Amino acid sequence: MQSILATALVIATTVSTSAFALSISPTQHSCSAADVSNSKMTTSKLRSVNQILRRKQSHWVGDGFEVFPVFADKAFTEELSPFLMFDYAAPKQFPVNNGPPKGVGQHPHRGFETVTIAFDGEVEHADSVGNRGVIKPGGVQWMTAGRGIIHQEFHSTEFSKRGGIFEMCQLWVNLPKDQKMTAPKYQGIDDKDIPEVDIPSGAGTVRVIAGSFGGITGPASTFSPVQLWDVKLPKEGAVADLPFQADHNCIVFVRRGGVDVLTGKDDDSADPLGPQDVALMKRESGDALRLRAAADDTRLVIMGGKPLNEPIAAPRPLGVDTW
């Protein structure tokens, strides 16, 4: 299984020769207020589940990241667009390490973006264009590989010295074909800069990393419309209604606890998800999600966006747009 922390290229094959010499600036995208910013639930049609992906066997990436390949064999498919792949490192205790830091050494990326979220522990990043930083708990690194970058990711020096619980995830977000060769870019986003918005029903909160919710826009700048939310549902039985644009792909991932995806057909109509399970929601089936917490302290990552409609061939370890 290809890991999202391993070497990969995602290249648009129909970009003109001149485009390879151009740097294309990113544009901030977010869905309109009608999509996800309503403070009250105004939609009447709930999205249904297209497919459930159950938790897969974990594997090691380097010596620092034991990850679940969340998208499994759905990675690099249009069903996930604009997302490509997703690795999740569940909470794991690491002892004090006085030797070399654990992680992944230098490796190249091109044509897409990597998004790393640190839930617990710290990740230290360095790349070939001079960016360095430590992703602390609650923080996010949104790295645009663009026309090419070499980087490395390790447990931070301080985390290595003290040891502790480590939990993180990394996603790949595809770039539109006309922006594959943009200049590499690094967005370091601290926990304090990510707004946390109450769900109107009182079911929990949404940390808005990208896109918008409840009229609040997240700090990440994206090249196409993307939603990325860190959702907390503290109490079992709490029901959250979350508007989500009907023509966008939508993915629900359970970090911790569990949820029932409710379709609204009847009281018993629910698709249960446990830890590390994924629901791929059916596009155009509705303009809202209804989720019921199946355990206390349930944590979710909800993501999606406008499909790029650019077919991808993904011979490992490369991912190549077929345009």
Image (cartoon, rainbow, N blue to C red):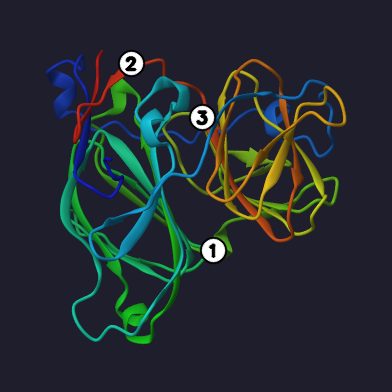
Check disc 2 and report its element: helix, strand or loop.
Answer: loop
Chain-order first, disc 3 or disc 2: 3
Q: Is residue 190 above or below residue 309?
A: below
Q: CA distance from mark 1 to mark 2?
A: 35 Å
Asked if labels 2 and 1 touch by Cβ distance under 8 angstroms, the answer is: no
Look at the image and tell me in which quarter the N terminus lies. top left
Chain-order first, disc 1 or disc 2: 1
Q: Is residue 73 left or right of residue 107?
A: right
In the picture of the structure, the residue carrying the numbered disc 1 is 191
- Residues packed near mark 3 inside 10 Å, few (<14), some (14 to 19) or many (20 plus): many
Inspect the image, locate mark 1, and give the three-letter code of the amino acid beneath it: Asp
- Residues packed near mark 1 inside 10 Å, few (<14), some (14 to 19) or many (20 plus): some
Q: Position of residue 313 (x, y in %)?
A: 25, 20
- Residues packed near mark 2 inside 10 Å, few (<14), some (14 to 19) or many (20 plus): some
Q: Is residue 323 left or right of residue 171?
A: left
Q: Which mark is residue 246?
A: none
Q: CA distance from mark 3 to mark 2?
A: 18 Å
Inspect the image, locate mark 2, and give the three-letter code of the amino acid beneath it: Pro
Q: Is residue 157 above or below residue 277?
A: below
Q: Which mark is residue 225?
A: 3
Q: Which mark is residue 311?
A: 2
Check disc 3 and report its element: helix, strand or loop.
Answer: loop
Question: Residue at the spot x=23%, y=74% of the render?
Answer: 101
Location of residue 318 (image quadrant): top left
Outermost residue toward the left in this view:
17
Q: Is residue 31 above or below residue 63?
A: above
Q: Nearer the viewer, mark 3 or mark 2?
A: 2
Chain-order first, disc 1 or disc 3: 1
